[in-house]
Image: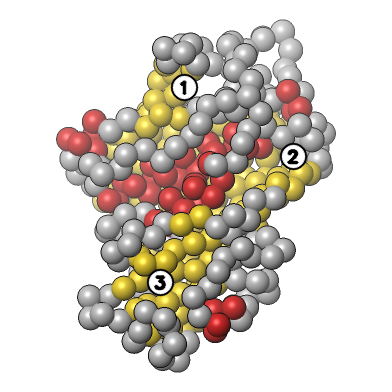
Amino acid sequence: MKLVTQRNNPFITALLLSFLGIVFPVHLQSQTAKPEQSPTASELQRHYQEGEKIAYKMTGVNQGRQRTIRYEARAEGLVKKAPSSAFFEEFAWPELRLNGQPFLLSPDSLAFREPLCLTSGYTLTVPDLSKVQPILIGPITDLLAFYADTQLAMGQKGLARAGDHVYVKNGVPSSWADGTYIVLGQDSIDFDITLQSIDQKTNIATMIVRHVPPAQTQIKFPADWMQNSVSDTANNWVEVEKRQDGKFAAQVGKETFEANIKIALATGRVISATMDNPVVVMERDCNDAALSDCGEPARFSIRRQITLEAQP
């Protein structure tokens, strides 16, 4: 996965593809919250009310190899009911600040709507981002990532008491290659989920969702040198970009991801969340597509840190 670029956001798209395909148990009985008592964590689910308004402030810091990008964005949502009678949240993105300055959003970006849902029977997908400005793709897909992690955590029956932990094996490589610029882009991850705490005074449950390298990566690396571990685990991330001069930038490394999510017990609504997404990378410039004629390796790290806070 890769930091936000001016072309697209394969970094987070691949992350989403890697766990949106997991099959969740289906239960669509969410209606309205029961005010007389809060559910236990094992019963945690999103209780929707049609017409409910939701707003979040999202801040992000994308630390790349050569520059750091900071953004602040506001997402405003409304709970709607689909023809199937299932509830979902539809978000607009009316405000964005880039590196501390207001960013003028285009009419297409302002008209964009992002459907999301925490009900486990609802299939989350990457929306059509072809008309939104590239700088807005990061916030849109980051919010989707938070919802996907929360939906995954809610679907685990083994999380009832503080300290409960489940491990969800996945490992199947996900691709974000576009065939033109990115000729190879894959990652391989499992999920390590912990119910960190249940605060009955505030009626908030805290979930930790970690994306971790599997014991054995399922990525098939195109060159032998890519199999040498860059960090302390087997490599679980690879990207090969074809440059305009015909050469190739080949990167391999270790990616992890940790989301800390606070959920209202009574409603199942996300109250706040943080995301930490580092990648340890080794890069070589290569003269051929087989990545056999390459220069000396360069090592560096990239990191994304995101916060999400519910707003009035």
Which element type, helix, strand or loop, lies under badge 2? strand
Among all residues in the image, which is located at the extreme left?
A: 107
Residue labelled with disc 2: 195
Q: Nearer the viewer, mark 2 or mark 3?
A: 3
- Note whether residue 170 is visible: yes
Q: Hey, what amino acid is under mark 1? A: Phe
Above or below, 199 against 21 in this view is above
Q: Which amino acid is tagged 3?
A: Val
Disc 3 element: strand
Image vertical order of residue 184 relative to residue 297, above or below: above
Q: Position of residue 113 (x, y in %)?
A: 32, 30
Q: Which residue is mark 1?
A: 88
Find residue 28 and report its image quarter: top right
Q: Between residue 128 and residue 40, name the one nearer to us.
A: 128
Q: Is residue 180 left or right of residue 31?
A: left
Q: Secondary structure at mark 1?
A: strand
Distance of mark 3 from mark 1, alpha carbons? Answer: 37 Å
Q: Earlier in the sequence, mark 3 or mark 1?
A: 1
The answer to whether the residue labelled 2 contacts the one labelled 1, judged by CB atoms less than 8 Å apart, is no
* Residue occupying the point 81% across, 40% down: 164
Distance in Å between CA atoms under marks 2 and 1: 25 Å
The residue beneath circle 3 is: 240
Separation of marks 2 and 3 at Cα, in angstroms: 37 Å
* Amino acid bearing label 2: Leu
Measured as percent of width and height from the top left, residue 141 is found at 42, 44
Viewer-closest of 192 and 177: 177
Q: Quadrant of residue 278?
A: bottom right
In this picture, residue 72 sits left or right of residue 236: left
Percent x, y of residue 4: 36, 57
Which of label 3 and label 1 is nearer to you?
3
206 over 60 or under it: above or below: above
